[in-house]
Amino acid sequence: MKGISCQANGIYTVDASCSGRSRLTAVHFVVDHGKVAVIDTGSNASVPNILTAFATLGIKREDVEWVILTHLHLDHAGGAGGLMSALPNARLVAHSGVVRHLSNPSRLWQKNVDVYGAAQAFMLYGRLIPVDERRIIASRDGMELPLGDRVLKLLDTPGHAWHHIAVWDEFASAFFTGDAFGISYREFDVSKRSFIFPAISPPHFEPVVMLESIARMVAHNPHVMYLAHYGKVTGVERLANDLFRLIHAQLAVAQAARGSGYVRHVEILTGFEEIVREECARQQWALNEEISLNLLRPDLDLNAQGLGAWLDRLQERRAMQAVEEEMDLATAEAA
C-alpha cells in the first residue's frame, strides 16, 4: 500500500492523508510479537487509511492493544472515536486532562466550530465520535505500557500543548514525539539530512516549557525521533540545537512586534518568512525560497498565531502583577 513506510524494530509510519496532502501527518504503528500500539490517529478521514494499512501488513484488528494520543489537536486525535469503534480490544491512552473530551467531545467540537464555522469544521474533521469512557486510560508521567516483549513509556512533554505527551521506546531508542519535537517535511531533506522547524500553535504555547520538554527527550539519547509531521528523523542532537535556535529566533521576532491583532500578526508572519529565507540558505535546500515558503506557510501562520496568543497572556500577567504590586504598596502604606 502506498503511504506505508516500514522502519526497523517493528515500527511503521502510515500516511494519515490529513487535509488531502500526502506526507503531512503520520500515524505510527509499533508491532511486537503480534501485539500492536497505534500512536495518534489523524482525523476521521484518516481512519480508512489506518484500517487498510492493518490489512496490508497482516495486522488483525483484535491484536491492537493500545491507541495512544500525543495530544488532543484534531489532526492527531480527531479519528480516535472512529478508530476505537473498529478495534475491539484496544484501550485509548491520553493525558488525564483531556479524557473527558474523548468520552464527550461536544465541547471540543464546539470550540472548532467557533474557530472554523460548522461547515468548515465538518469538512476538516468530520463528526467527532465519542469513546466509551470504560476504554480510556488517563496517562501519568512515567507510565509504562507493556507491548509484546517491549515497554512503551509515556512522558509529559508540554509546551506545544499543555496536555502533550511523548512515547519513549527504549528497545528502538526512539521517541514518538507528536509535535513536541517540531515538524520535518521530507521535501526539505538534503542528501538524507533532515531539517527541523518548531511547531507552535494557539492557544497554549509556552516557550520555556517547550524548551524544557525538548531537553528532556534529548537527555534519553535517542537514535531516532518519529514526528507526526512527518515521520522518521535522525541526527537528533543537531536537530535539537536547530530547534533551540529557531524557537529563540521566532520569540525575538514576536517580542519585537508592535501593535496588536491582525497588524501584529502580519508583522510576526513577515519576520518568520525572513527566518525561512535564512534557513533555506543555511540548510542549502534544493527547493527555492518561494516553494519553501508555500510549503511552510500554513505552519508559519499557526506559529504566528501561537506566539500572538502567548504575547497576549504575557501582557495579561504583567498587568495583573502591576495591580498586585500596587495593592501590596497601598497595604504597606496603610500599615
Image (cartoon, rainbow, N blue to C red):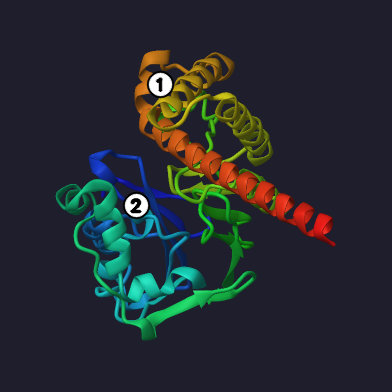
**Left or right: 211 in relation to 290:** right
Q: Secondary structure at mark 1?
A: helix
Q: Farthest residue toward the left?
A: 119
Residue count near mark 2 (Cα–Cα under 10 Å), binned few <14, some 14–19, many ≥20: many
Residue count near mark 1 (Cα–Cα under 10 Å), binned few <14, some 14–19, many ≥20: some
Residue corresponding to mark 1: 292
**Left or right: 8 in relation to 244:** left
**Would residue 147 be visible to someone looking at this image?**
no
Of residues 306 and 79, the one nearer the viewer is 306
Image quadrant where one finds the C terminus? bottom right
> Which kind of residue does numbered mark 1 sit on?
Ser
Q: Secondary structure at mark 2?
A: helix
Q: Position of residue 237 (x, y in %)?
A: 69, 39
Of residues 56 and 69, the one nearer the viewer is 69
Q: Residue at x 59, y 17 (%)?
A: 282
Please report whichever mark, 2 or 1, sits nearer to the chain's N-terminal start. 2
Looking at the image, residue 170 lies above or below residue 310: below
Q: Position of residue 278 (x, y in %)?
A: 55, 16
Residue corresponding to mark 2: 75
Which image quadrant for residue 153? bottom right
Which image quadrant for residue 36? bottom left
Q: Position of residue 235 (x, y in %)?
A: 63, 37
> Which kind of residue does numbered mark 2 sit on?
Asp
Q: CA distance from mark 2 to mark 1?
A: 22 Å
Q: Position of residue 262 (x, y in %)?
A: 38, 29
**Would residue 86 be visible to someone looking at this image?**
yes
